[in-house]
Amino acid sequence: MSNNFNSFSKIIQKKSNGIELKNNEINFVVKNYLADEISDEQMASFLKTVINKGLSKNETYYLTKAMQQSGETLDLSELYPVADKHSSGGVSDSTTLLIVPILASLGVKILKMSGKGLGFTGGTADKVLCFQGLNNNLSIEQAINITKQTNGCFITQSENLAPADKKIYELRDKNGLIESIPLIASSIISKKLASGSDIILLDVKFGSGAFMKNLNEATELANLMIDILKQESKKACAVITSMEEPLGDFVGDELEVFESISILMGNKKNNLLKLSEYLSALILSMAKNINLNEAKKQVRETIESKKALEKLKQIVKVQGGSLNIFDEEFKSFKVNLKAENSGYIQKINTENIGFLTRKHKGTFNNFLGIEIKARTGRKVSENSNLAILHFKDNANLINVKDIEKDYKRCFEISNIKSIKQFKLIEKIIK
Ligand code: URA
């Protein structure tokens, strides 16, 4: 222990002096922290030094590999090639619910591991449970068998993948040490490498509802992650997309599942569809070695012909979920959220919409979520609808006024007409 302490002190000292750490030194820190030989306080001071001094590309790669190798790496070779996508968190981002059936219907295998909602972002692991009875708590063998049968599967994140990242992430979260591009890159990619897929698409978000608040930071994060994936011989590309507004029209798990089904039925066209088509086409072009335009055509065709819808039904059924939701009309009790004054929407506080929805859903079990009606740049008149609040029924609505007040603050309205146009897809990094 005292030997360990001496070595650890030297490593922190070296980093503080701006000297690049070696692979064995980073490995030492990760291994000993996971084994409780380095305390939370010591690790927090190491992470603070890393945040102050930064990490070189080599150091980031070593950290990624050390965290990946702290647990198992899944062997998906019998499904080769397997695709995966990762979104760096968002609000009303149900692209996974669309991309999995779209790709599976086009013959691309995608065994999608997802986490639960975190902070202001929703999680696919929660959303798929809205298909009553669906089991996503599967062993990897079960998930491989389902993917062989259907090409697609929804599964929860395994506890054995990158356990060092899990422990370090929790410490970062508790101590406000999340915001570091190399730490975020190594955290995300350690899990991607451990989950064993061959083709990886990263949707890196920036803006109000994302970890990266601006385009430059998002680009730096994307470049770093793509570098590591390329070093590991993965087929990979990243797309930088805006999270200045909720992606789809609905926020709240049940509402988002309903929205995804409506889109696959052909009843709804919005930014959620646009981005899902784009991300699916990028993955398809990597999986089949075809150009992006051809891939876009195939993606559109599988949606329009309802093959993607049928594929989603097949996956849900094989995973034990009920198909009733596909036939039922979505019913809810609605409360309009009205603008208090006229003007133009300057900004939507997307992060707060995400937080509030998770908070109010956790507090009032009657609350389903919010449907966004007014978008950035839109002219609104007094009393026109900014959004609609959805409830399961009209029982126990005593707190509606408080919920309304909270959400109204998320829409910034003023008389200024010229505002920047919202642009969804900024660039691709290969
Ligand atoms: N998501 C992760 O998995 N890790 C981070 O550090 C940030 C977002």
Image (cartoon, rainbow, N blue to C red):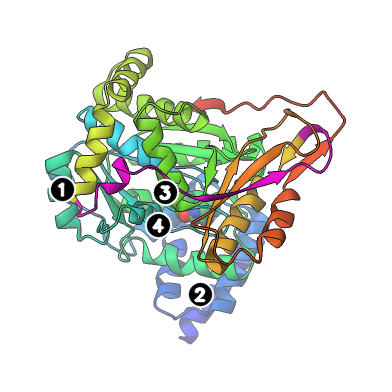
> Of the residues tagged 4 and 2, which is closer to the observer?
4
Query: Mark 2 falls on what kind of element?
Result: helix
Q: Quadrant of the N terminus?
A: bottom left
Residue found 34% across the figure and 58% down from its top: 157
Of marks 3 and 2, which one's residue comes earlier in the chain?
2
Label 2, on which residue?
Answer: 7
Q: CA distance from mark 4 to mark 2?
A: 43 Å
Mark 2: give few (<14), some (14-19) or many (20+) Cα within 10 Å.
some
At 69% across and 46% down in the image, what residue appears?
337
Distance from Cα at disc 4 to Cα at disc 1: 19 Å
Nearer the camera: disc 4 or disc 1: 4
Which element is circle 1 on? helix
Question: What kind of residue is marked 1?
Answer: Ile
| Range covered by the magenta-colored residues | 319-345
Q: How far apart are labels 3 and 2 at the CA level?
A: 27 Å
Whether pointer 3 and pointer 1 mark residues with C-beta atoms closer than 8 Å, the reply is: no
The residue depicted at 67 percent of the width and 39 percent of the height is 214
> Residue drawn 49% across and 53% down?
122
Seen in the image, is 296 located left or right of residue 402? left
